[in-house]
Image: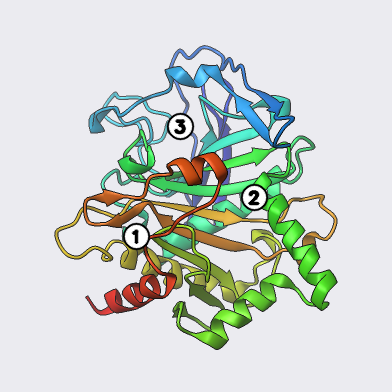
Amino acid sequence: MKKTVTTLADGRELIYYDSADDIVRDAVDPRPLDAVSTSSEIRRDPLLGDSVAIASHRQGRTYHPPADECPLCPSREGRRSEIPDTDYDVVVFENRFPSLAGDSGRCEVVCFTSDHDVSFAGLTEEQAGLVLEAWTDRTADLAELPQVAQVFCFENRGAEIGVTLGHPHGQIYGYPFVTPRTEQMFRSMESHRAETGRNLFDDVVARELADGERVVLEGEHWVAFVPYAAHWPYEVHLHPRRRVPDLRELDEAARTEFPQIYLELLRRFDRIFGPGEPPTPYISAWHQAPFRAPGREEFALHLELFTIRRTPGKLKFLAGSESGMNVFINDVPPEAAAQRLREVASE
């Protein structure tokens, strides 16, 4: 992998990740851009104890542009985009409309490919492996920033999820705090260790492997399963068999196998609801340990993949119980979801 760091016209950082070592990235961004101005601030909720990012400047962000005006495509034929070069493998750049900025953290955009019309599932294993390297490199770099406590790499896919740009891309958030979801996992992890003397994540994976009914895919270095208490209609957790706290500590064998397992999962997601159905909307999210949290070595890196579609033409909405009290109600039994994800392997 070759990494080339440059800047855009308004001073934002842009990074090219290339498979070939002989690629030269010297294109200049000629756009007359004003300096980025953000109003991001973090406010603490005294009742729930969590944090909310207030970012009013995001109201003016790019919203469903025509394909020929996509800001994530390469700059070609006189049309200038966020990527100055005429082609690229993987690109990461600072978000022009960040939810978190400055002392409040950092937000980045990850473009998985220059091909506007492909999805992550349509990438080759080599391309998916390069994205993994980019995620890992960004995690390592952001870990060095004093204002970043935790890094979250994720992809929102589909209009139903709220995606406003059709180009295949994801995002990276560098939070200035430990997120509530991670804090809850740490509390559960610590309680389990106190009660049993064992690691919670190890026990969860061992239970799923022993039971087998919810296992979707197994590789030599990764295992994917629908969790026992899945919140979403179709939800899969992907764990490396060797527990590590974040992407930086994956070994070479796990990195090599990851594209095979992950691409197969994404392709199965697109087949859940049968032929003729539109691509399945999903959120794909890496859970990584906070950088400076006590006990971080006990945490297990894992990827959570889920869709809000529960059946053809119908979505799972977060209504009263879910949104008001954070108590999920799942219409699809996890065992049935796992069975369906195993069935579609041969379709």
Residue 51's disc number: none
Counting residues from the N terminus, which is met first, the one under dot 3 or under dot 2?
3
* Residue occupied by mark 1: 121
Q: Quadrant of the C terminus?
A: bottom left
The mark nearer the N terminus, 1 or 2, is 1
Of the two numbered discs 1 and 2 in the rendering, the one whose residue sits closer to the viewer: 2
Whole-Å distance between the Cαs marked 3 and 2? 40 Å
Name the quarter where the N terminus is drawn: bottom right
103 relative to 263, above or below: above
Q: Secondary structure at mark 2?
A: helix
Find the distance from the CA under tag 1 to the CA under tag 2: 27 Å
Q: Amino acid at mark 2?
A: Arg
Question: What kind of residue is marked 3?
Answer: Ala
Please say if 77 is above or below 112. above
Crowd class of label 2 (few under 14; some 14 to 19; many from 20; radius 10 Å): few
- For the image shown, how many numbered marks are present on the structure? 3
Q: Which residue is mark 3?
A: 27
